[in-house]
Amino acid sequence: MHLIQSTQVPQNMGLRNRKDRHHCWMVLPSQVIENQQQEDGDLIKPRKLPNPILASHQHRSLHQELLFCHRRGVLPKRKTELQSVLEHKRRELHKQRELALQPPSDLEVKLRTRRQRIQVYELEEKKRSEDLKNVPEFVRVRQTLKHVSNS
């Protein structure tokens, strides 16, 4: 029995034909796909990041509304230049009023007090210079001479 099997094995396993050798190392495409799916199951597949603007609910609703209006032929009308300038001025005035209602910050308070001190000092200097102008000339000269002689 052993002899019979040995004689049959070389005939079945013989790889003398090129077709037999070719089939021996070639893997079928279905097997490759199955192997890739098994390997890919372990890996994280890269995905394109979502655009935050396009993903926002507000943007989508606005876009749908614009498409709807475009289909109906009712597009938002542009305002005239005068209207847009007036609205801009109204907005700026509104912002200034809101800022005026807010309590001033510590820095603003300190700057205001410093500005007031400087104004008071400037007024005193102005009064001194006016007083010196009203004083007769000989008194002014005498005062300067006193300062020069003391030093």
Image: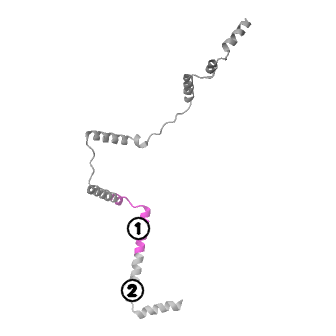
Q: Which residues are magenta?
A: 97-119
Residue 130 rendering spot, x and y as whole percentages: 38, 84
| 23 relative position to 150: left or right | right
Q: In the rendered image, which quarter is residue 96 located in?
A: bottom left
The residue tagged with tag 2: helix, strand or loop? helix
Mark 1 lies on residue: 112
Q: In the rendered image, which quarter is residue 44 located in?
A: top right
- Judge the density around disc 2: few (<14), some (14-19), many (≥20) Cα neighbours within 10 Å: few
Q: In the rendered image, which quarter is residue 100 located in?
A: bottom left
Residue 119 rendering spot, x and y as whole percentages: 40, 74
| 38 relative position to 80: left or right | right
Q: Amino acid at mark 2?
A: Asp
The residues bearing labels 2 and 1 have C-alpha atoms spaced at a distance of 29 Å
Locate the C terminus by quadrant. Answer: bottom right
Give the overall secondary structure of the magenta segment.
Answer: helix
- Answer whether residue 49 is magenta in the image: no
In this rendering, the answer to whether 89 lies above or below 18 is below
Q: Which of the numbered marks, if any, corresponds to residue 131?
A: 2
In this rendering, the answer to whether 28 lies above or below 117 is above
Q: Amino acid at mark 1?
A: Arg
The residue tagged with tag 1: helix, strand or loop? helix
In this rendering, the answer to whether 74 lies above or below 94 is above
Q: Of marks 2 and 1, which one's residue comes earlier in the chain?
A: 1
Name of the residue lying farthest toward the front: 17
Q: Who's the residue at 44% across and 66% down the image? A: 110
Q: Who's the residue at 27% across and 56% down the image? A: 81
Q: Nearer the viewer, residue 150 or 137?
A: 137
In this rendering, the answer to whether 28 lies above or below 105 is above
Q: Who's the residue at 39% across and 61% down the image? A: 104
